[in-house]
């Protein structure tokens, strides 16, 4: 097994702490859009990331992610793929286009903005020449460019609107990278009125956590400037260094027992109905009951992705037997290449017949399920909040898009208890974050803790 960027071994964790996540190395300071000539300019940095086969491999090799997509595509073959025209928005390596062809699509338009399109072209042409992969011979039409480009839009529409759009436009905390906006644009431009959108929606969850070690590690970074260095007093920069360190969302897994409350109802986005403005700025109200007396060091976050088909009412419902045949989980993070390559009960080479009325599939990235390359994100409070068992912590998290293909996040929470109203208020916390400035932390890896054999032998 090759070691991937996102599959960093435990021993490397501290050295690599502070790295940027997927799309992030590419996103800093990058603006979306194209020049008048239709040439990608500002987004070059972002698309260079996706032009790398190694980075595409990291995504394909995320078993929970790609296995769930396979289940959602093959399980919905009857309602969304067989004899249908499909658009794969942001095709990358083409993996979802190939799966769509396996599910019986009549034609797949593989739309890709990065130069990964040229590599995908090699596979498409090889198949069209009859040299490999007969399942997509003459079925995939490559369109290179950004979906935002009018010329690209015309090219997609050359064969009319599509029955289904498949895409993986998801980033850390669901929306980082802002590709969901491109997904909604594709929906508005290309999807037939009763067409299918996969994924169909996403939900962002929050829950308070306690983690003294993470807090101290972050404080320690700021402390670097709280001293004399090479004969110069840097203490004037300490407050700024602290602000910067705590404004970085921490991306990585964490032990589920560090949560001190259940997640409150998530912020739900229905991709069929969501408007662009819904993604540009929104607020999530939070309300938690603390399970055990603790110092709350911040809010942990994860997301679920829904693949819920919406076939026309005339479609026969899926039978119990059809659904039960698909009642298998897509594998754990401890299983890697053998899972993808060989015949495996969790990833059958010949899956059961697709249910006639479709299959509802969910992908969770929460702390209690197999790891994905998105992992989870934590928003650290610059000062922890002492909360007693049974108390309510209430407040809001405000998201506003920024020009780094990401979001500025503002957190306001307080303990719901009568108390002083002066500043600083011991019961209230206000904090600001930039979702593009992620800091990786690999100090916890459940597979290593469990002693799992990642080679799947
Ligand atoms: C997260 S990757 C998914 C790749 C592949 N579909 C998969 O599931 O492995 C998203 C892909 O969409 C492409 N992309 C992002 N924004 C795009 C846009 N506005 N128009 C066309 N392609 C875009 C990126 O270059 C990248 O290859």
Image (cartoon, rainbow, N blue to C red):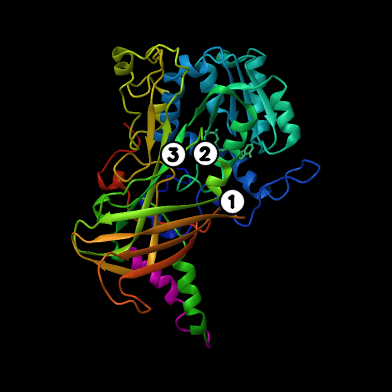
C-alpha gap between disc 2 and disc 3: 11 Å
* Residue 257 at x, y percent in the picture: 23, 52
Give yes or no for contact between labels 3 and 1 (Cβ–Cβ under 8 Å). no
**Disc 3 residue lies near ligand 1 with CB under 8 A:** no
* Residue 301 at x, y percent in the picture: 38, 51
Query: Which callout, 2 or 3, points at the residue further toward the start of the chain?
Result: 3
Query: Which callout, 1 or 2, points at the residue further toward the start of the chain?
Result: 2
The quarter of the rendering in which ligand 1 is drawn is top right
> 171 or 440, which is in the foreground?
171
Residue for badge 2: 274
**Front: mark 2 or 3:** 2
Above or below residue 329? Residue 257 is below
Part of the protein shown in magenta = 214-232
Above or below residue 319? Residue 201 is below
Residue 383 occupies which quadrant of the picture?
A: bottom left
Give yes or no for contact between labels 2 and 3 (Cβ–Cβ under 8 Å). no
**Front: mark 1 or 2:** 2
Residue for badge 1: 405
Give the residue at x 38% y 32%: 362
Q: Residues within 10 Å of mark 1 (few under 14, many from 20)?
A: many
Residue for badge 3: 202
């Amino acid at each position: 097994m090759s070691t991937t960027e996102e599959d960093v071994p435990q021993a490397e964790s501290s050295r690599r702490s502070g790295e940027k996540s997927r799309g992030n190395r590419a996103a800093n300071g990058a603006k979306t859009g194209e020049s008048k000539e239709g040439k990608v300019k500002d987004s070059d940095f972002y698309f260079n990331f996706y032009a790398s086969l190694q980075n595409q491999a990291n995504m394909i090799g995320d078993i929970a992610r790609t296995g769930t997509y396979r289940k959602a595509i093959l399980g919905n073959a009857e309602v969304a793929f067989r004899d249908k025209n499909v658009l794969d928005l942001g095709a990358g390596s083409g993996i979802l286009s190939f799966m769509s062809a396996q599910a019986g699509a009549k034609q797949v338009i593989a739309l890709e903005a990065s130069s990964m399109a040229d590599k995908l072209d090699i596979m498409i042409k090889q198949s069209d020449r009859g040299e490999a992969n007969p399942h997509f011979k003459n079925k995939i039409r490559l369109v290179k460019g950004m979906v935002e480009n009018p010329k690209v839009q015309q090219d997609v529409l050359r064969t009319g609107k599509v029955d289904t759009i498949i895409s993986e436009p998801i980033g850390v905390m669901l929306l980082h990278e802002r590709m969901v906006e491109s997904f909604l644009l594709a929906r508005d431009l290309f999807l037939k009125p009763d067409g299918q959108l996969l994924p169909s929606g996403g939900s962002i969850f929050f829950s308070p956590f306690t983690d003294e070690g993470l807090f101290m590690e972050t404080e320690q970074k700021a402390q670097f400037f709280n001293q004399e260095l090479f004969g110069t007093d840097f203490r004037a920069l300490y407050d700024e260094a602290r602000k910067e360190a705590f404004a970085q969302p921490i991306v990585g897994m964490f032990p589920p027992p560090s949560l001190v409350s259940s997640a409150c109802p998530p912020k739900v986005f229905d991709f069929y109905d969501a408007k662009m403005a819904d993604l540009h700025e929104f607020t999530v109200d939070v309300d938690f009951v603390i399970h055990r007396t603790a110092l709350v060091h911040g809010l942990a976050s994860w997301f679920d992705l829904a693949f819920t088909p919406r076939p026309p009412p005339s479609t026969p419902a899926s039978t119990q037997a059809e659904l039960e045949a698909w009642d298998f989980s897509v594998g754990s993070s401890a299983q890697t290449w053998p899972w993808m390559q060989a015949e495996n009960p969790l990833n059958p080479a010949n899956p059961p017949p697709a249910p006639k009325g479709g299959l509802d599939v969910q992908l969770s990235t929460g702390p209690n399920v197999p790891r994905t390359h998105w992992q989870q994100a934590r928003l650290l409070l610059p000062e922890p909040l002492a909360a007693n068992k049974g108390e309510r912590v209430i407040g809001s998290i405000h998201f506003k898009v920024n020009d780094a293909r990401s979001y500025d996040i503002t957190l306001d929470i307080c303990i719901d208890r009568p108390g002083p109203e002066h500043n600083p208020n011991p019961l209230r916390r206000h904090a600001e974050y930039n979702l593009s400035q992620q800091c990786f932390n690999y100090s916890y890896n459940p597979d290593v803790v469990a002693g799992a054999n990642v080679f799947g032998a």
